[in-house]
Image (tube, coloured by chain):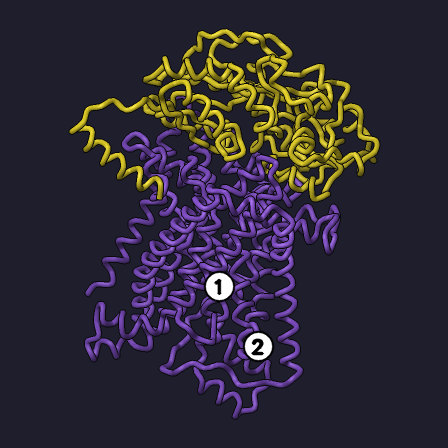
Chain colours: A yellow, B purple
Amino acid sequence: MYSFLRGTGKGLALLLMSFNLQAAPPNLVVYTYDSFTSEWGPGPQVKVAFEAKCACTLELVGLSDGVAMLNRLRLEGANSRADILLGLDTNLTAEARASGLFEPHRLKLQASALPGPWRDDTFLPYDFGYFAFVYNREKLTSPPASLRQLVDDANGASILIQDPRTSTPGLGLLLWMKAVFGDEADQAWARLSPRVVTVSKGWSEAYGLFLKGEADMVLSYTTSPAYHIIAEQDSRYAAAPFSEGHYQQIEVAGMLRSSRQKQLAGEFLEFMLSEDFQKIIPTTNWMYPAVAGDTLLPAEFAELIDPSPALLLEETQVARERKAWVDEWLEVMSQ
Amino acid sequence: MSRRFPAFLVLALLAFMVLAPMAGLLNLGSLPGYEMTDLRFWESAYLRRVFFFSVWQALLSALLSVLPAILVARAFALQPDLPLRRALLRLFALPLVVPAVVAVMAVVSVYGSDGWLPLGRSLYGLNGILIAHVFFNLPLAVRLLLPQWQAIPRHHWLLAEQLGMNSWQRWRFLEWPMLREALPGVVLLVFMLCLTSFAVVLTLGGGPRSTTLEVAIYQSLRFDFDPARAVVLALLQLGLCLLVAVVTLKLQRLPEVEIADSATPTPITALHKALDIALILAATVYVGMPLLSVLIDALDGPVLSVLSSATLWRSIANTLLIGLSAALLSVSAGWFLLRYSAGLAYAGHTRGARLVDLAGSIVYVVPPLVIGTGMFVLLSPHVDVFDWVFPIVISINALMGLPFVIRCLGPAMRQNHARYHRLCLSIALLGWHRFRYLEWPLLRRPLGLAIALVTVLAMGDLGVIALFGSPASATLALLIYQQLGAYLIPQAAVTAMLLLLLCLAVYALLERLIGGNSDATY
């Protein structure tokens, strides 16, 4: 109904404007993913906080995920209404950059909380996290201590994972395996495969099945237990620390070259790195803020595991090899 | 009055809605930078496996759904006085609207390791897929087959009784010939539904060894961003369905129809009655258990806090708007198609009639993702797509509902036409008057079923809305996904229950308003 009304509303607005040429406040359009815009995501709070500063309206458009956003922008090209894209991760930045749709941000990430230096001149990080296998302490008393142990222990824990073709954590595990096992990743997958209960389309299905008790562990984030601790006062869930380190996910935003309000878009990116935005992240997106600050993290985050060393493959290598790696995974897993 | 013109218009619209987006995508595929990846289908072991697995699981699912459904529908038909019969039949319309992710969780609640009937690890694989598909499609097949019994004329039952026919003979000479008209279409519909199943297959299938063509299409369009490959795979899926359609419809026999009022069959032995009731009970337990688990999970959750959210009520409004509009559009289009095909069948052009029906049904297997993305490609250079989210979502949902309309309304309209067409011509009962005084009273019951079914179907749809989604256009199904994505699993359970209850209410209301107040519910 809203869209219908808005369509008509627009016509009416045009009509009124011909009588009254008063300038409306500018409208900044941000493409992002669904869970960012949802009632429980960072979206609503971010909107209020930014609009209080900018004398503009912030329109958050939720699409299903990073891949969908990028495809959408490619289809829209220069006609896109979007000024900002928020919600890609570093596995997609190489492709996004190559599309030529983005504008350099000309900002500096100060007081970065990321484990490594940030050198990207097109995209800026707003949060990050680490993939991990989450388990229920009451049900699994001795979780594997390394990815290698998880893979090699034939009587080890059963796991739920996501499909790398349809899900970000799924792709994260694929890269994690590559980072640890290199060219022998396919053999490692073959050894792990018997303990994979199922491979779901998205994170939600796998996590839901895990909470229903379908497997010992689920592929998620090191920060997932924080949700249960803070929102449910439940400390049964924990992430298993792996000695090889944990694969990282860094979520970024960038400004569109086709944007007609680059000044305002730049202000939004700056706001994104400010405390007002960053403090919203931990308890809505359940990730680490990209900017360091003592007051940004709730105390409960101190109970989470130390995921170091942080693993991250080169974005150009990922862009180049992703398809071949997924095909390899498909061949092994569909045996 | 021409019956041909509106039908041709609908057919042209259908063709346009399916082919134009595909052409748009193919055109994109020829742009620089969009190189089509390797399509030597038969050389890729993976795609070959995907193809065979898709067909195999869809065939098995169709057989396991439709064969028991015949027995259950017969039991319902022969027990018209069963208590709660109407409520049970309404319950049977519900599985169809359960969003895939909720259905997966419900199936796991029942058959998972901590479930009521634990199957453990063996749930994941073909078992899980079949359990879920039968849960979706057995009740649907029951609903679609049941009206065939109603079409058996009263004097046939009386004659059978006088001749002392036993149950088997009645089945062989009365019921089977009537059933044969609807059966192939229902098998084809269920086959198509299972062929295009996505989240159920991926999640309960245990991994990529159970991948369907639909997943491969999704991968091409989303992950690889290779629109041309997606279109080729979609055409392959369409071709496969056409092949299956040709085979199944060859088995179809259109019965000779007599002018007679229908009636419920005569009573039968106590043993038979007990058997029928046992069958109905078994089917109800099978269908009811996962639905019950949705209810139990929800009542455990924060019902009041979910109910007090403004987002929920906005989603409910959007869901109703999409469902009702899609149903109206779908049933109108189906009406014109079926009126034309009924005329063709009456004039002896059986093949032409089948072709028209088939054209309306087969569009279902073109993945909404392909149509939606293609429409986006066509529209976005010219209009602001955000203002078109609802019209697009509604029209795609109407398209996806069309095969259901054809299954619900087709047999009844054909019988109606055969019985009364000549009479109408002779008394010059034409146009609006024919609809008002003849077709409406006789067809309102299947019409009500069709509208109710397509409404709830569109209400539960996620695929299309997620493609264009923006914060204002959330539906209940999308809300469930958003809640699940934000760790809010108890809230999602509550929303899932509300979606089910809303569907049940809308279904009952529409069926009553349009179908009329009759004891014999289909």
- Which quadrant is the N terminus of chain A positioned in? top left
Q: Residues within 10 Å of mark 1 (few under 14, many from 20)?
A: some
Left or right: where A21 falls relative to B38: left
- Which quadrant is the C terminus of chain A positioned in? top right
Residue A200 found in image quarter? top right
Left or right: where B102 falls relative to A48: right
Q: Earlier in the sequence, mark 2 or mark 1?
A: 2
Mark 2: secondary structure: loop
Residue ID at (44%, 87%): B155
Left or right: where B302 falls relative to B351: right
| Cα separation between marks 2 and 1 | 28 Å
Q: Position of residue A90 (x, y in %)?
A: 55, 18
Q: Which of B146/B504 is in front?
A: B504
Decide: is A147 above or below B341.
above
Q: Chain of mark 2?
A: B
Residue B228 found in image quarter? top left
Query: Mark 2 — residue?
Result: B82
**Mark identifier at residue B372:** none
Residue ID at (61%, 36%): B487
Mark 1: secondary structure: helix
Query: Mark 1 — residue?
Result: B184
Q: Which of A235/B266 is in front?
A: A235
Q: Are marks 2 and 1 on the same chain?
A: yes
Q: Position of residue A213 (x, y in %)?
A: 73, 43
Decide: is B370 above or below B181.
above
Residue type, label 2:
Leu
Residue type, label 1:
Pro
Q: Chain of mark 1?
A: B
Q: Which of A212/A273 is in front?
A: A273
Residue A60 found in image quarter? top left
